[in-house]
Every structure is written in structure tokens, then in C-alpha cells.
Amino acid sequence: MTTLMFPDGEKLTERLLPLGQAQELKIFSRDYPSWDLTPRQMCDIELLLNGALFPLKGFMGQADYDRVVEEMRLSDGTLWPIPITLDITEEFAGKISVGSSIALRDPEGLLIAVMQVADLWKPDKSREAQLVYGTDDSQHPGVAYLFNDSHPVYVGGIISGVEMPYHYDFKELRHSPVELRENFSKRGWHRIVAFHTQNHIHRAHYEITLRAVKSVEANLLIHPAIGVTLSGNNDHYARVRGYERLLQRYPEQTTALSLAPMATRLAGPRETLWHAIVRRNYGCTHFIVGRSHASPGDNGQGNTYYGPYDAHALLDKYREELGIQVVPFQEMVYIPDRAEYLPADQIRPGDTHHPLSGTEFRRRLHEDLDIPEWFSFPEVIGEMKISCPPRHRQGFTIFLTGLSGAGKSTIAKALMVKLMEMGGRSVTLLDGDIVRKHLSSELGFSREHRDLNILRIGYVASEITKHGGIAICAPIAPYHETRRKVREMISRVGGFITIYVATPIEVCEMRDRKGLYAKARAGVLKQFTGISDPYEVPESAELVIDTQDCLPDEAAQRIILRLEKLGYVR
């Protein structure tokens, strides 16, 4: 194993076994239960293996987890603010026990590491949410992930690395902490200030980094998180191209770019503390903390989850333990009369200033409006426009949901024709019955199989949307959670519009030519939506249509008008 000594004598270690031992472990692991790592877990295990999460030697056991959640410390007292846990299904938990070994594999089945199980427990996720995120509000993306996407059982133990996760992209920009420290040493860099970002760098960020390196007389490491993000900015390719272009704006030999495979939590002050610890492990001596660092923004009602400078206060509290100096900054605003950016606390009375919010910036991108050059450099804006085209050039999915017989399929067919008449994008209809026949013919009608059918529809629709087309889906899709997963899947790559076809069940029964409702009421058909199984009404559909008083043509036209209002058609 490669080691590097910290100044205080501690060792930062890459946890990969020597080649011979790794090959032996590959053979033994064939008999171990295998767990396929999720995208977040893939990020975490890479940071565990390369030493970025030092002093952790594996996924946390219960003693570490409990104390981190309660006190932001490991069980031995070491400062650590974020739980690094391996969540698994109850089914998989039933196959393993304390003392056994499990094989941790990537989605393609490649063995990444073997873990010796030290702990197996069911966490109190409400407690974790309240203490780590400061809220149990499911509008918070980190809390939503914890409640809806993470598995119910945690397993902890030391890991032995067999092979580092492999990346085909930007290989020259991916460095372990040991590699980055050696790189700094070769360049003669002894003071390095790190800048964390998961977005394109705007002019305000550029100005902050310039001021930071000048104030502490250090070199700059731009160290973006390009693993799993919860902010909706998942196209790291465009972001990295923008970072590479921006490097040319800095003085030569002063700035480096390296990519961090981090899975963000958006846990505000706690996550900021974590970011600082990780950058210390990468060999940086200073860390920039701006306004609302690692914050998810507001809760949809105009209220923020964290104060804009709460992270500054938390890091200051632990400055003696951090091992890295914090360089705090207030919000940077543009002063047009002086043609410069200044921290908010340096604005003089009478100064006109222009803050351009992220919300306003996204609106301008979506509506193809001008973006002022003072907000970002032209070459960076160009990359942003490639990765986030205006809505009228994006692919999107129309997701019609409602009871059987509500009129979904008829509306979908009318809508498809209207959109094809308009032209500009390919249009694909994914009707529930047709998909059942061609994509899910082996599935039954249990809740598990119905969910799987909807997720298959969502996956196909996401591919259509990602490539600029229009997908029209018309399944019953009765459950909130499954619809949420489909929305999340598709919203990463384009637009998603839910249409709730709210035709009353009495009307649906009258239209039922197949006699399905009658069979369900007689008990012949089990788990029939609306009779023996619930339909969970969408709480936030973009449009609600009752076909009692609306012909299919009229319904399709209402959807077209809503698409026009949202900017998807012109």
C-alpha cells in the first residue's frame, strides 16, 4: 500500500491490496455474497480506497455512525461530520451476518473491494435527517435521497481494495490524494488553496479565487465534485470543458485542475466541514468557503435551510482541529459603475450592484435570453448553453396518469398527432397496454411488477428525452413514489410534465368496454386500481384534465398551450 506521512505523523493510505493478494481475493470472493454498489456508493468507495476519506478504513460501523450523527465525531473522538455508510436491502441483509465477508462490485460486476462485516443495523433515518441535515423536510434533496432512495439497512466494516473504479473520461485530471500531493511537491507548491464547486464557475467565483490566492499567497486548486450531484447539474462533461477553458484566464503556473469523485449531500455547514477535511487529505493548506456553501437553496416557499454564513461559523468553531485554514468570503456582487466585483460588505452607499441569482440564470438559459458577460466568460457560457439548451430545443416527456378508462390513451394519441404536425422533434407514444405487450409481457400485476413496468417506461422515456425527442407516456401509474422516481430519472436529462387525467371512477366504469371494473368488484380481478388497490392522486401535476367535459382534441390542445407557457414549444 502507498503511504504518505502527515506532518503530525499520521499516515494517509491508499487501501488497494498488492496485485498478488488482490488476485487471490478475487478467487475467494466468488463464494461471497455480492452487492452491486449504487452510484453514490461508487463515489464513496473510491474516496475510501484512495485515502481521501482518511482516517476511515471502510464504511462506518454503528458506533462511528451514531457518534458522527450526534456529535460530528468518530467513536475515537476524531472530528468527522458526515456519515459514510453502506446501505443495503433487507433481502441482502438476510444473506449476511457479522463476521462474514461480502464482495462489493460495480454495476458491471467488476470486483472493487471485499468488506469484512463488523456491524449490521437499521438506522433511525428521521434522526439522521434532523441531526445531519437539520430538517426532515423531504423537499430537501439530501433528505429526499435518505428517505426515498437509500436502502433500509446499514452495514459497516473495513474494506480491502481489489481494483479502483475505472473512468474513461478525463483520465489526466483524476488524481488520488497521494498523486496530487506528489504533483504539488514536484511543482514546488507549499501553499495550496482549494476551491470546491459542483457548478460552472461564474465570474463571481473567478474573482473569489483570485482574491483568495492573493490574500494567502498560495497556488490554486480548482477541485470540482463530479460524482453524484443532487443539484440537478449532472452533466460533468460540459462543466469540465468549461473549467479547462477557464484555466487559461489564470496566471500561468499558478493554477491546477483536478476532479473529485464526490457524491454531494447538500448538508450545508456539516458538508462544508467535510469538504474541508477531504481537501486537507488531498494536500491543500487552505479552503475557500463562500456564501451558502453546500446548500440546496430554498424549500420552494422562499425559506432557506441554512443561514448564508452558517458554514463560516461552524468551520471557525473547529479551526484548531481541521488541519486546513479556511478562507471565508461573503457574496460577490458586480458594481457596474466601477466595473468590478466586490464582497457584499464592501459595497459603498449609493453603489448600484447586480447579483444574478442561479434561478435567474437558469431562466435565461431556458428562455434563450442574453446572459451578460459580467456574469461569466463567453467561453464558459458557450459550454453552459451546450449542456443546458433552451427549453424549446430540449427533449421532454409528457406523463399522463389516471384510472383505467380515464381517457389517457385517447388524449395521448391526439396529442401525438398535434405535436407531429408542429414538427421539430421526433415523437414517441409509450401507451400502457402497448408497453405491457412489447416491453413487460412477463410481468404480472403485483405492486412490485406494476412499479417495475412504470420504471421501464420511465427509462425508455428518459432515453428519448435525452436525445431531444418527445416521449408521451400513458400508464395508470397509481403510486406517488414510483412517479417520483420516473420524474427524477427524466428531469436529469430534459423536461418532465405530469398530466393528471382526473376523470371520476363512476365515469371510467361506464366507459369500460372490457368489463374490468365489474370483474374487480366481483373479486375476479385482484389488486385492481380504484377498486381493490389505491390510486394516489398526484399532488403537483402541471395540468389536471377531467374528460367528462373535455373532448380528446380539446384536452390535447390544453396540453399544447401548457407546453407553450412552460417554453417547450413555440
Image: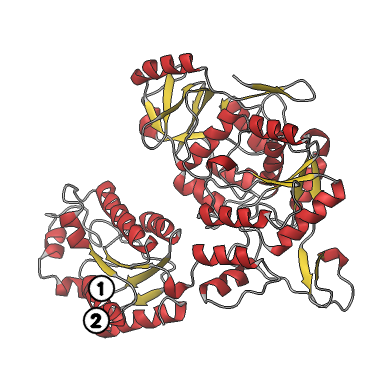
State the mark number for residue 473. Answer: none
Residue drawn at (39%, 61%), measured in percent from left and top? Answer: 466
Is residue 349 in view from this perspective? Answer: yes
For the residue pair 146 and 209, the one nearer the viewer reads as 209
Task: List the residue tagged with mark 2.
Answer: 552
Identified at 30% across, 60% down, the residue is 477
Position of 38 with respect to 57 (left or right) is: left
Question: Callout 1, which amino acid?
Answer: Ala
Q: Is residue 172 above or below residue 347?
A: above
Instruction: Specify the farthest residue to the right.
Output: 349
Whether residue 85 is visible, yes or no, is no
Give the residue at mark 1: 412
Q: Is residue 545 left or right of residue 87?
A: left
- The vertical placement of 422 against 396, above or below, is below
* Image quadrant where residue 372 sits: bottom right
* 147 or 279, nearer to the observer: 279
User: What is the three-letter code of the residue carrying label 2?
Assistant: Pro
Q: Earlier in the sequence, mark 1 or mark 2?
A: 1
